[in-house]
Amino acid sequence: MQTTLCLDFGNTRLKCAIFKENELQDLLVLEGDDIATVEQLLQTFQPQKSILSSVIKHYEAIEEILAAKTKFHLLNHQSKLPISSPVGKPETIGADRLAICSAASTIHPHHHCLAIGLGTCITYNYINTFHEFLGGSISPGMTMRFRAMSEQTALLPLIKAEHNFPLIGYDTKTNLLSGVIMGMAKEIDGIIDAYKEKYNHLKVFLTGGDMDFFLPHLKNAVIADPYLLYKGLFAISELNN
């Protein structure tokens, strides 16, 4: 049974998804991007293939190790993809965006797709019926908004996200929770509505580490998939390896 490592190095966390054939078997949070961590992954799972999506300045020596011991691919703007990206500067597109767009287009081919990633930033990514990723928009993510209000004011505290909060905040903490989480939910719904007005039969995907905070507050139906990025990485690995 063929094993593929799908490594995702994001701004907040480093993760590795393990696929057996085409099924996701496990998802690990890595402590670092050092040689010892990668060698441990290779020893434990004995993969035949690997792919790396990175939006950080990772330790480049791990690419050599992965290439020596697996069929390795580094996701970039020159990768073979199930989508095309006829935009002005394809080399500036984040690897994470390429991955979730590839997954959305693979899952629902011949549909207009909007893939929304909720991570350090929110990314809105539009793929048309011809499998063309035409761009979208980026706005601050949840943690970034909490930090900005704390760092840019004298009195507002830095708080952690919580699932339960009132619409009408009754103290500083609940005001911040309502403002950020409910405000972002209404932003997401508004963007979805704008796309729906323009494109019929739109398929909307929602993914990312902060996804669960917003699902209860959205009025629009979405395809919620916390593993969308890894499914995209696997699809890209299959095309390039």
Image: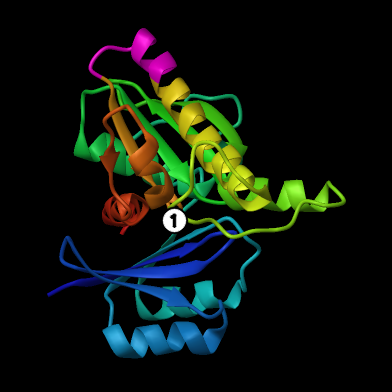
- On the question of residue 184 being in view, the answer is yes
Colour scheme of the picture: rainbow
The three-letter amino acid code for the residue at tag 1 is Gly
Q: What range is drawn magenta here? A: 193-201
Q: Which residue is mark 1?
A: 209
| Quadrant in the picture for residue 221 | top left
Depth order, front residue of 42/207: 207
- Most frequent secondary structure within the magenta stretch: helix
Is residue 7 toward the left or the right of residue 123 in the image? left
- 81 part of magenta stretch: no
Residue 216: horizontal and vertical position, in percent? Answer: 34, 42
Residue 211: horizontal and vertical position, in percent? Answer: 40, 48
- On the question of residue 91 being in view, the answer is no
Q: Residue at x 28, y 83 (%)?
A: 45
Residue 72: horizontal and vertical position, in percent? Answer: 39, 67
Density class for disc 1 (Cα within 10 Å; few <14, some 14-19, many ≥20) is some
Q: Residue at x 17, y 60 (%)?
A: 22
Depth order, front residue of 75/8: 8
- 197 part of magenta stretch: yes
Residue 43: horizontal and vertical position, in percent? Answer: 34, 90
Q: Residue at x 48, y 80 (%)?
A: 65
Residue extending farthest front? 170
Element class at badge 1: loop
Q: Residue at x 58, y 42 (%)?
A: 169
- The tally of labels here is 1
Depth order, front residue of 91/20: 20
- 41 to 114, vertically: above or below: below
Image quadrant in which the N terminus is located = bottom left
